[in-house]
Image: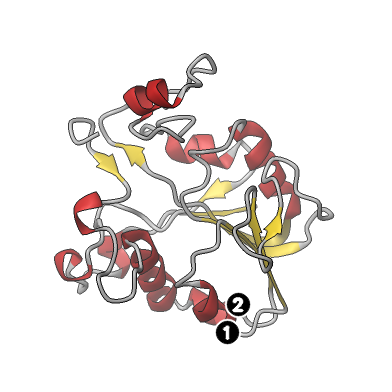
């Protein structure tokens, strides 16, 4: 993964020793705060996959009308069992869909992105962070690779179903949503990535209709 210039979780600076927040938690918090997007959550409907323990209370403090916490394998009663490939809500129901480091795990990326686009309102925003490699021109994905050992070798993690390359935005948009990435340099130029333990190569990955 180092040789392929992975942009994603940094295992050397992963969890905060004080509160346990991961590098992707910290980066997303910084992005949403600095961009002002967090304040726009008031009165909105949010569908939040794999909800982060450290981010959920903070996002809830902005007063969303509905904050649906979703996971394929919920760990507690406040998280609903929802398959991102078959979301049980009507078309255009949500103003926000958040899936932070989720889409590298799903069985069918096409079904998942189609469902996200379907339940997203015409003026809504999908936040779809995912790890990807600068050193790959195209995403690697092989349905024959199913064992944890083989996935570890090919994708760098035993529960990943693909390794995104530089075509990551095209793959995540699903030819339905338009991608509007925001770079760390554009929004967080004064934030020292070493101090905060974040990867300055990771964009804020936004998608809209």
Give the residue pinned by disc 2. Answer: 41
The x and y percentages for residue 22 are 34, 62
Q: Mark 2 falls on what kind of element?
A: helix
Q: Count the marks: how many? A: 2
Among the 4 quarters of the image, the one containing residue 67: bottom right
Graded by Cα atoms within 10 Å as few (under 14), some (14 to 19) or many (20 or more), the crowding at tag 1 reads: some
Q: Taking 43 as reference, is 93 left or right?
A: right
Numbered label attached to residue 62: 1
Asked if labels 2 and 1 touch by Cβ distance under 8 angstroms, the answer is: yes
Looking at the image, residue 173 lies above or below residue 27: above
Q: Name the residue rendered at 51%, 52% in the picture.
A: 128
Among the 4 quarters of the image, the one containing residue 40: bottom right
The x and y percentages for residue 122 are 72, 58
Q: Residue furthest top?
A: 144
Q: Mark 1 falls on what kind of element?
A: loop
Q: Name the residue rendered at 32%, 23% in the picture.
A: 153
């Amino acid at each position: 993964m180092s040789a392929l210039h992975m942009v994603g979780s940094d295992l050397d600076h992963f969890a905060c020793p004080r509160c346990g927040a991961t590098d992707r938690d910290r980066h997303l918090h910084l992005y949403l705060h600095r961009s002002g997007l967090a304040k726009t959550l008031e009165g909105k409907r949010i569908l939040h996959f794999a909800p982060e323990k450290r981010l959920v209370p903070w996002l809830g403090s902005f007063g969303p009308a509905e904050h649906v916490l979703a996971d394929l394998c919920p760990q507690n009663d406040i998280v609903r069992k929802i398959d991102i490939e078959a979301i049980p809500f009507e078309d255009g129901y949500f103003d926000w869909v958040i899936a932070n480091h989720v889409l590298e795990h799903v069985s069918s990326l096409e079904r998942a992105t189609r469902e996200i686009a379907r339940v997203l309102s015409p003026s809504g925003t999908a936040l779809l962070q995912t790890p990807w490699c600068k050193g790959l021109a195209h995403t690697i994905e092989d349905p024959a690779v199913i064992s944890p050992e083989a996935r570890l070798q090919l994708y760098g993690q035993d529960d990943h179903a693909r390794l995104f390359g530089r075509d990551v935005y095209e793959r995540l948009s699903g030819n339905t949503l338009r991608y509007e990435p925001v770079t760390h340099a554009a929004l967080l130029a004064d934030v020292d990535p070493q101090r905060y333990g974040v990867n300055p190569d990771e964009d804020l990955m936004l998608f809209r209709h």
